[in-house]
Image (spheres, grey):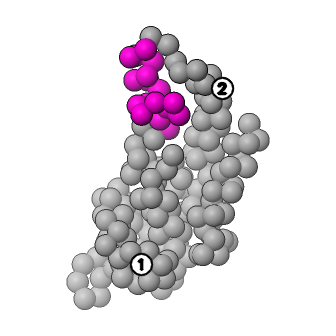
Amino acid sequence: MLSSASKYAIQIIIYLAKNKKQGKVGGKRIAEDLNLAAPFVGKVLQPLAHSGIVKSTKGPHGGFVLAAKPEETTLLQVIQIFDGDDAFQECLLSSCNCKNYTENNGTACHIHDEIAPAREQFIKSLEVKTIADFLELNNENTVDSLSSILEKSVSNS
């Protein structure tokens, strides 16, 4: 449901929040510390900087810092930068989104009504969960912990 770019962006933002006292951190250092491919980290950081969540400084003493407040940056905001709203409209039975499926077939897919409440709960969880909620997590387990927390919030619906 979520792209790799969204997942890595959340990891990177959490990393920058945890390392805010260090000041600017280079993309290569972020990639090494998070065990991610440096070119992919660079591609993820560009939209984050463009959105204002991260601040970028060029040059030999340049790097990236978190510009947004972790307690005000929701997971939904980050995900929408990379996946847009369509990420949550993907149909489980078709290769299109639910709205397109309904328009093309005149009715919703067979499991739409069963999945819709869980999808809505998932989106609500993303709207209220902030980066600050994940700052106590260990860097190596951030994505696993994030997935686990979100799964619990969906299953509680």
Nearest the viewer among 131 and 27 is: 27
Q: Earlier in the sequence, mark 1 or mark 2?
A: 1
Q: Residue at 63%, 45% (x, y): give it.
A: 125
Residue 147 place in picture, x, y as percent: 63, 56
Name the image quarter holding residue 146.
bottom right
Determine whether, in the image, residue 157 is placed left or right of residue 24. Answer: right
From the top left corner, tell me how far across and down residue 67 is, in percent: 42, 66
Extreme residue toward the bottom, this view: 60
Provide the secondary structure element on which disc 1 rests.
Answer: helix
Residue 132 visible somewhere in the drawing:
no
Q: Tell me the residue that label 1 is attached to.
A: 31
- Magenta-colored stretch includes residue 130: no
User: Looking at the picture, how far across and down is residue 142, in whole percent?
Assistant: 60, 68
* Spatial CA span between label 1 and label 2: 40 Å
- Relative to 144, is 129 above or below? above
Q: Is residue 92 magenta?
A: yes
- The correct choice, above or below, for 125 with respect to 68 in the image is above
Q: Residue furthest top?
A: 106
Residue labelled with disc 2:
114
Residue drawn 51% across the image and 56% down it = 73
Taking the spot 52% from the left edge, 74% from the top edge, the residue there is 15
Label 1 Cα crowd, 10 Å radius (few <14 / some 14-19 / many 20+):
some
Q: How many residues crowd around disc 2 within 10 Å: few (fewer than 14), some, or many (20 or more)? A: few
What residue appears at the point 56 percent right and 76 percent down from the top-left corner? Answer: 18
Asked if 60 appears above or below 95 in the picture, the reply is below
Left or right of 67 in this view: 126: right
Q: Which residues are magenta?
A: 88-105
Q: Nearer the viewer, residue 23 or 81?
A: 81
Q: Quadrant of residue 71?
A: bottom right
Question: What amino acid type should be assigned to the residue bearing mark 2?
Answer: Glu
- Position in image of residue 74 (x %, y %): 54, 52
What's under tag 1, amino acid-wise? Ala
